[in-house]
Image (tube, rainbow, N blue to C red):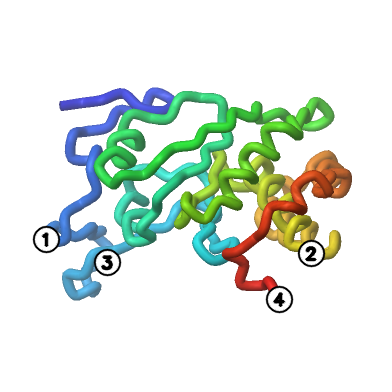
Amino acid sequence: MRVEGFQGKVYEAAELSPPRPNSPITTEDDNDNNGEELFVPPLNFAMVDNGVFRSGFPDSANFSFLQSLGLRSIIYLCPESYPEANNEFLKANGIRLFQFGIDGCKEPFVNIPEETIREALNVVLDVKNHPLLIHCKRGKHRTGCVVGCLRKLQRWCLSSIFDEYQRFAAAKARVSDQRFMEKFDVSGMKHLRITFSCSKR
């Protein structure tokens, strides 16, 4: 069976579900893994805090790794439909999808909808949704803005927020994203307790 997925990629039936433990992922140049299954994280994957992760867009090669995280939820920050293969993976693993479609624009036409960021943060702050993965396409700009605004709620100083953003965005860092994070008003969200943070006192 063949299924057409995101950006026209055709997925074979074998790719629609994560590999079983008795059929480990192997490559021609990696024959010394003693038959153990290889876990491949998505692009730009990192832990944000207890039960919260970030990354670029995961594909079928990353499903085993995501399965190992025991995810309950995924926050998807792109407006495009989620690929069929990914939907099948979510269904098979009981993972809930929260989609907040933010257009991926280049400067100087970047428009970050503040209300959408707030809605995404409400999902992140609800521990019932953890473990949770936040992702967009590359895990840089849209994901970076959500994480940066979360850091403001965690009372990080701006220089640390920008350092983290730039570590993932690298040469693609946008002044407009950093300006958005700087101006983002967390006063209306301070009543929301951050109960999961490893940095809380």
- Tell me: residue 200, above or below residue 179: below
Q: Secondary structure at mark 1?
A: loop
Residue at which label 1 appears: 22
Residue at screen point 19% across, 75% down: 34
Along the line of sight, which residue is nearer the eye, 181 or 174?
A: 181
Between the C-alphas of marks 4 and 3, the distance is 45 Å
Marks 2/4 in contact by CB < 8 Å: the verdict is no
Which circle, 4 or 3, is nearer the viewer? Answer: 4
Which class describes the residues within 10 Å of circle 4: few (<14), some (14-19), or many (20+)? few
Question: What distance separates the C-alpha of mark 2 from that of mark 4?
Answer: 13 Å
User: Residues at badges 4 and 3 in contact (C-beta under 8 Å)?
Assistant: no
Q: Earlier in the sequence, mark 2 or mark 1?
A: 1
Measure the C-alpha gap from mark 2 to mark 1: 45 Å
Residue, disc 4? 201
State which tag comes first along the sequence, 4 or 3: 3
Q: Residues within 10 Å of mark 1 (few under 14, many from 20)?
A: few
Residue marked by disc 3: 30
Q: What is the quadrant of residue 159 in the picture? A: bottom right
Q: CA distance from mark 3 to mark 1?
A: 17 Å
Is 37 on the left-hand or right-hand side of 177? left
Look at the image and tell me whether residue 175 can be seen.
no
Point out the frontmost of discs 4 and 1: 4
Question: Could one spot residue 2 in this view of the protein?
Answer: yes
Dot 2 or dot 4: first in sequence order is 2
Identify the secondary structure beneath mark 2: loop
The residue at 31%/44% (across/down) is 94
